[in-house]
Amino acid sequence: MKILFLGTGAADFPSVKCEGFRRNASALIDDIFLIDPGPWVIDAIEEYKVDTSKIKYVLVTHYHSDHFSKNTLDYLISNGAKLLEIEQGKEIELDGYKISALRGNHTVPVCHYILEKDGKRMFYGLDGAWLLYEEIDAIWTRGVDLAVFDATVGFVDGDYRVFEHNTLNMVLEMKKSINTAIKKYVISHMAYTLHTEHKTLENEMKKHDITTAYDGLVIEF
């Protein structure tokens, strides 16, 4: 499987590119599944020379404006993509993939996804605080090769957003508790106002064997 990070930033990034800029979080899986058609996706598609004719399905985690843009969705549909709406707690199979939609811990209904093909599994869980038990149970039961965790709040203490987003300390605690059920950990959805610059963050998370995603990063597993 392969993931291309089209964006790795949270909602508070400026509406124009600046130093340290990250597009709103979005990802492309195996060139086929686009997760979150946010407002910067078309820009990313152009920069990373994505072949839109290969994008078959669009998955939406939730409908906050940094994760969903009707203009982006219309653009993808006009190029042949189809919106997939999977009810929380349900699982579907198509084109050789098994896709599970799990309930996330957020202020509005949010889906976290497990995508599986040929024995490889990926968990994508952005916008959410502590993983809910059904998510953990699915991860422990199945095992996951790569997991993308929300890391909105950084190492900031006492921030109100911890009830709907993770701090890095929360990610580290979950990693210790989940242990080897996940082979590779990645963080994304970093807030502009709550993080240091990328290189410093990347070096700090390397100490914990966690990859810090950036716009344009490709991981194959």
Image: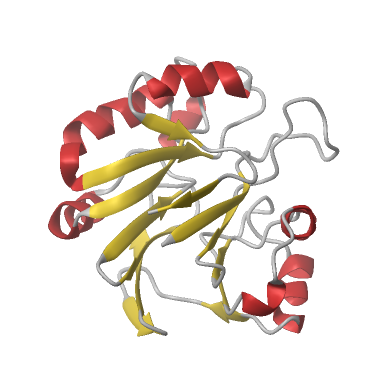
Residue 57 appears anywhere in the view? yes
Quadrant of the snapshot with the C terminus: bottom left
User: What colour scheme has been applied to the protein in the rendered image?
Assistant: secondary structure
Quadrant of the snapshot with the N terminus: bottom left
Q: Is residue 193 above or below residue 99?
A: above
The residue at 66%/23% (across/down) is: 193
Please provide percent x and percent y for residue 184: 32, 42
Which residue is nearer to you in this view: 154 or 7?
Answer: 7
> Seen from this angle, which residue lies furthest left?
141
Please provide percent x and percent y for residue 122: 36, 57
The residue at 33%/23% (across/down) is: 208
| Left or right position of 49 against 162 | right
Please provide percent x and percent y for residue 75: 77, 74
Which residue is nearer to you in this view: 140 or 130?
Answer: 140
Q: Is residue 127 above or below residue 96?
A: above
Q: Is residue 50 above or below residue 18?
A: below
Please provide percent x and percent y for residue 154: 50, 23
Residue 109 appears anywhere in the view? no
| Left or right position of 120 against 127 | left
| Left or right position of 218 against 139 | right
> Seen from this angle, which residue lies furthest right?
16
Q: Is residue 147 above or below residue 102?
A: above
Q: Would you identify the image quadrant in which residue 173 lies?
A: top left
Which residue is nearer to you in this view: 105 or 120?
Answer: 120
